[in-house]
Image (cartoon, grey):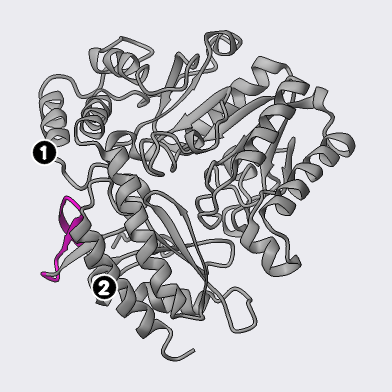
């Protein structure tokens, strides 16, 4: 009898029967607040009527128009529509299916455009699970262990994770940022010469690495060094894009411009679609035949993405993410103030997290796991992340209402109380 791999483990025991808005309905007859959003994917909620209608109409018209064989209208329209939201000058697009594929496409483009072999990534970044993407990933060893050797030419520099460095060395954000940029300069002086360095790739907010935002001084410091040395700055917005942080792009908080941007997750409300965007000048340096794929830019996924972008604009979901994110953060901070086990509350918009620590200030994954499981009992679905698995994240759909935030906070408070009871 066939079965799923035992290593494909679910974070909750829920068997989903259907989804509607911010809710999932299980075969157990219960309704759950889904504050996982499919790991930030269902940006417009489960089965938004306009997304459903667009996908249904497209399924009845053209399901698969393979985009290196023929062109199709949903892809052409999506390219035009993305021009309204992409950073200025990033007008040339390539589409794939997953974040990992888009990351690898960005890396390939950066190497071909510069003629340089090396990529610098930030400590704690998550960029995917395929071999090259895993080689760029340092959010946890589970992504990298057991199938080496990984791709060469990857070099790691610190990310300004202020809570981490403050808890160990007493550094504030300014000191942490100064250290991170100083170590990058040292890396470029001792390990990967700028003339060998194609790109610096970074998430505006670490995802799997613990939901830690960057800051303006750090990202602008990366931009300055990239410009000085002819290095491309690649921003991985797979999780932070399409309004998740309360701005359309996560980097919009920090006043920095990318050379290449990577998008996926929330772009198509659950349909597999990813892409990269760059200037015409940079994209023109890709080698002929280096971009392609059987399913990339699928017609149904593109139709869903068009509907998603319309819903995000028409329903003011970027603003809603900022407003409801502030309400959610305030509630999380209230709970944390009464809970010594929560060492930090952080994030941007509707991309928020709580870090659980022991009385000695060390990572406490056991308590984080108990709280996450207790939340299921309270009807609230959450996920953990971070190198030690001691961070519980909250990423509700961008359509979440004030009332649903408050309902989620009540469930969170009860889950924290239950999960911390036996510490």
Q: Nearer the viewer, residue 120 or 314?
A: 314
**Is 225 located above or below residue 128 in the figure?**
above
**Residue 325 at what x, y percent from top left?**
35, 53
In the displayed orientation, state which residue is furthest to the right: 190
How packed mark 1 is, by other alpha carbons closer than 10 Å (few <14, some 14-19, many 20 or more), is: some
Mark in front: 1 vs 2:
2
In the displayed orientation, state which residue is furthest to the bottom: 422
Identify the magenta region.
16-29
The N terminus: image quadrant: bottom left
Picture residue at 47% right of the left edge, 17% below the top: 88
Please identify the quarter of the rendering in which residue 293 is found: top left
Is residue 23 shown in magenta? yes
**Residue 174 at what x, y percent from top left?**
70, 50
Q: Which residue is mark 1?
A: 49
Overall secondary structure of the magenta stretch? strand
**Is 384 located above or below residue 292 in the figure?**
below
Is 202 left, or right, of 350 in this rendering?
right
Distance Cα–Cα, label 1 vs label 2: 28 Å
Please identify the quarter of the rendering in which residue 113 is found: top right
Q: Secondary structure at mark 2?
A: helix
Is residue 333 shown in magenta? no
Mark found first going from the N terminus, 1 or 2:
1
Q: Which residue is mark 2?
A: 410
Picture residue at 47% right of the left edge, 54% below the top: 347
Q: Nearer the viewer, residue 207 or 299?
A: 207
**Residue 98 at what x, y percent from top left?**
42, 36
**Is 223 located above or below residue 145 in the figure?**
above
């Amino acid at each position: 009898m066939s079965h799923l791999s035992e290593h494909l483990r679910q974070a909750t025991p829920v068997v989903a029967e259907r989804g509607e808005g911010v809710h999932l309905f299980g075969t157990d007859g219960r309704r759950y607040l889904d504050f996982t959003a499919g790991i930030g994917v269902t940006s417009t909620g489960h089965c938004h009527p306009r997304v459903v209608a667009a996908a249904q109409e497209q399924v009845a018209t053209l399901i698969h128009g393979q985009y290196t064989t023929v062109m199709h209208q949903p892809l052409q329209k999506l390219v035009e529509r993305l021009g309204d939201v992409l950073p200025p000058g990033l007008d040339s697009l390539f589409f794939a299916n997953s974040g990992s594929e888009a990351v690898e496409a960005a890396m390939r483009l950066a190497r071909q455009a510069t003629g340089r072999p090396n990529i610098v990534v930030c400590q704690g970044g998550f960029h995917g699970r395929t071999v090259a993407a895993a080689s760029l990933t340092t959010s946890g060893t589970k992504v990298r262990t057991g199938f080496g050797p990984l791709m060469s030419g990857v070099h790691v520099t610190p990310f300004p994770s202020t809570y981490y460095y403050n808890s160990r060395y007493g550094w504030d954000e300014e000191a942490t940022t100064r250290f991170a940029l100083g170590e990058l300069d040292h890396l470029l002086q001792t390990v990967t010469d700028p003339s060998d360095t194609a790109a610096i790739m970074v998430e505006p907010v670490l995802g799997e690495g613990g939901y830690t935002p960057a800051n303006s001084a750090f990202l602008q410091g990366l931009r300055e060094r990239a410009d000085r040395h002819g290095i491309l700055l690649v921003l991985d917005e797979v999780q932070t894009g399409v309004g998740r942080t309360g701005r359309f792009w996560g980097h919009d908080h920090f006043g920095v411009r990318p050379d290449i941007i990577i998008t996926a997750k929330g772009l198509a409300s659950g349909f597999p679609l990813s892409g990269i965007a760059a200037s015409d000048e940079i994209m023109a340096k890709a080698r002929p035949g280096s971009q392609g794929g059987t399913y990339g830019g699928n017609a149904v996924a593109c139709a869903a993405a068009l509907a998603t972008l319309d819903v995000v604009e028409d329903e003011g979901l970027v603003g809603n993410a900022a407003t409801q994110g502030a309400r959610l953060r305030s509630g999380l901070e209230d709970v944390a103030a009464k809970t010594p086990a929560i060492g930090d509350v952080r994030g941007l918009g509707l991309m928020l997290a709580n870090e659980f620590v022991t009385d000695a200030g060390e990572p406490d994954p056991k308590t984080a796991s108990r709280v996450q499981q207790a939340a299921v009992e309270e009807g609230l679905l959450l996920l953990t992340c971070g190198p030690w698995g001691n961070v519980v994240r909250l990423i509700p759909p961008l359509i979440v209402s004030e009332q649903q935030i408050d309902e989620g906070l009540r469930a969170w408070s009860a889950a924290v109380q239950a999960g911390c009871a036996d510490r």
